[in-house]
Structures are given as C-alpha cells and as structure tokens.
Amino acid sequence: MKSYLDVLATPGAWRFLLPALVARVPSAMTQMGVLLLVQWSTGAYGPAGIAAAAAAVAQAIAGPWTGRLADRHGQARVLLPQAALHALALGTLLALAAAHAPVPLLVATAALAGGSGPQVGAMVRARWARRLGGTGRLTTAFAVESVTDELTFTLAPVLLVGLSTAYTPVVALAAGLVLIVVGTVAFALVRTDTPPPTRTDHQDAARSGAPAAVWRVRGVVPLAVGFLAMGSVFGSLQVGITSLTAAWHLPGAAGPVYGTFSAGSVLGGLLYGAMRWRVALRFRLVAGLALLAAATSALTAAGTVPVLYGAAALAGLVIAPVVITGYTIIETLVPAAVRTEAFTWLAGAIGLGIATGASAAGQLVDRVGPSAAFAVPPLATALAAALLLARVGALRPREEPAAPREPSLLPG
C-alpha cells in the first residue's frame, strides 16, 4: 500500500488525475451506449450491434493518429478540438436516433462519434511515463491506471443502464457527453507533467530519434496482438456471461458476475503493482498470457452460478497484471517522442479486441450455445502467448542514452 501512496502523493498528480477520471467514466459508456441507443431507435439488436462495432473499430483506427498528433503538437492542442468534434458527432447521433433516422446514417455517425473520442487514458499514462519513466514507481503508476480502467468500466454500465431505464438512452448519453467534454477540457488545461511537443517536421523527427511509424518499432506489433487477445476476453465474457445467465433464467446475475470479474481484476492489479519483481517484463508477459489462457478455460466448465462467479474472479485476477506489464514494456521500447501514440496503439488494440471477441462470441452463442462463447478467451490468449514467446527477444528494452531520473522508492 505504501508504494501506491507514494505514487499518488507525486506532486501535482491529482491536478490531472481528477479531471481525467471525470472524462474517462462516461467515455467507457460509449460503445454500450451506442448499442442501447440504436436499439431504442430502431427496435432491433442487429443494427445496434453493427453501430456499436463501427464505433469501436473507428476508435481503434483513429486512436493512434490522435496519439501521434498529441506527440507532435502537445496534448491540449489535440484534446480541445477533439472534445468539440466529439460533442458535435455524438450530439448529432443523439438527434438522429431521437428522429429514428435510417440505419446507415446512424451507423456512419456512430463511427464518427467513436473515432472522435478523446484518448484521455493514453495521455494520462504518457504523463506518468514522463514523470516516473525509468523508476520502479512506473509499474505502480500503471497499476493505478489499470485499476482506474476497471472502475470506469464497472461504473459506466451502471450509470448508463440506470439513466436509460429511468429516462431514455438519449438522456443517458447526453449526460455522459457533458461529463466527457467538461473532464477533457479541464484535463487539457492542466499542464502538469504534460509531455512537450517533440515532432513538428521531418528534421525534428530525425533529431528526436522518433520512428516514421510506431508500429514499425521492434516489439510493438506483437504487443498489440497480445492486447487484441486481452480485449477479446472482455468482449466475449460480456456476451458469454449475459447469454449463459439468461439461459439459466437468471438474467439479473449477469451484472454481479461481470462485476466479480472486474473486482478480481482490481485486486490482481493492486497486488501486482505492489510487488517487487526480479523476472524480466517480457517473460512476465508471456507467462501472464499463458496463465490467462488457463484461467479463462475454467469458464467453459461453469455449470452453476457459484462456479461461474469463481471462474470470472479467477480470470479477472490474472488479466490486470498482464495489461500493466504490457503498458510498462511499451514504455521501454519506444522513444519518449512517441509515447502517447504507442499507448493509443495498445488502447485501440483492446477496443478492437472487445468488438472482435463480442462478435465471435455472439456467433458461437447463436450456432452452438451460451457456453461456447467462453471458448474465445483461452484460444485467443493462448495464441497470443505463443506468438509473444516466439518474438520474446523483440520485447527487450531499447538502448538509449541514460538520462537523470527520479530515484525509485521501491527496491530493485
């Protein structure tokens, strides 16, 4: 616990953490919110699923470009216009849904809303990396971020469903939009630990050692594949848990079971971030993915609600440490000039994995049955573990000139 208190006591940290939290909770509502909104507007789940997938894919594609612009021009110069664009896109989607517009128009606007979503989470990690990079406290800071992600993805559905039930999905997403804009603008205006703009032209890029494209940096693509697999765990579990509890005539258990998965992830992240490790990060990542494959395979044998709770908690306990390790590794692979873009690559991979996992799990549920959805996580994570094991050498930290760093408060 002391390691967390030390990180959270970092001077100025709360100035950007609080507005970031305000922006990130409603941001986690977007994909599910689009699903509920379009279903409410059209009365069908098919178009709603397509719109939600369009939003997720657009966000995964646009995220790295947002990160690159932030690295080149600074976070505020990207976030402020992006908040305005997102408000326009999502506001238009709400108006179209309320008017029961044609499905193609709803899907296209949903993609614009997803693609314009502010990448606040990646930018928070970039600030932590600038302040704590090269110290033992960075892993703990990334553990804080992982726990924050889990909390936002736990709270967001509760707020979304509550407001949608009490009013309409239009009201729910409108309230979320206000929070996104307020939180994003407040975060952008706080300059504490903001990475300075590092690339404005080709000459600047050459001087900074920044690559022409982050995905070409050694190790980035394998890491992104690993995060894609982890995203598929989130997406397929949402579908699997929902469909299985419905088949058992216990639909109300879906929320608590998924909440148990999130709680396990929070606990796993806290424990991982507080421990001292002597095993290299790259080997921890491969072992973590293999362990995640084993843990999620227990879900396929869940025949009762108590067993489903236990299997979900076990899977959650493992996944947060793997996410934390991946973010810590990529900080050691890329130059400081492209950190934000690198973090958005991983965030986008998770988002794309969520959409892919949910789609694959949905097809398996329709064709085979609810339990078949749980075949996706162990298969995806096992394949990712095998790929990363084959490319484990690519995950070695890059060599760069030593720079003065704040001393670590953790041994080793």
Image (cartoon, rainbow, N blue to C red):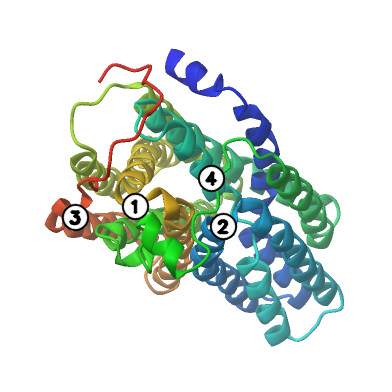
Quarter of the image where one finds residue 40: bottom right
Label 2, label 1: how far apart the Cα atoms are: 15 Å
Disc 2 to disc 4: CB gap under 8 Å:
yes
Label 2, label 4: how far apart the Cα atoms are: 9 Å
Quarter of the image where one finds residue 39: bottom right
Q: Earlier in the sequence, mark 3 or mark 1?
A: 1
Q: Earlier in the sequence, mark 4 or mark 3?
A: 4
Residue 336 in the image: above or below residue 407: below
The type of residue carrying mark 1 is Val
The type of residue carrying mark 2 is Ala
Q: Quadrant of the C terminus?
A: top left
Tag 4 residue = 195
Question: Would residue 78 appear left or right of 222 to someone viewing this image?
Answer: right
Q: Residue at x 40, y 32 (%)?
A: 138
Q: How many neighbours does mark 4 have within 10 angstroms: few (below 14), some (14-19), or many (20 or more)?
A: many
Q: Name the spot of residue 325 as percent of width and height, x first.
A: 33, 40
Q: Quadrant of the N terminus?
A: top left
Label 3, label 1: how far apart the Cα atoms are: 12 Å
The type of residue carrying mark 3 is Ala
Tag 2 residue = 70
Q: Nearer the viewer, residue 318 or 247?
A: 318
Q: Earlier in the sequence, mark 1 or mark 4?
A: 4
The type of residue carrying mark 4 is Pro
Question: Would residue 46 appear left or right of 96 to someone viewing this image?
Answer: left
Q: Residue at x 49, y 17 (%)?
A: 6
Tag 3 residue = 394
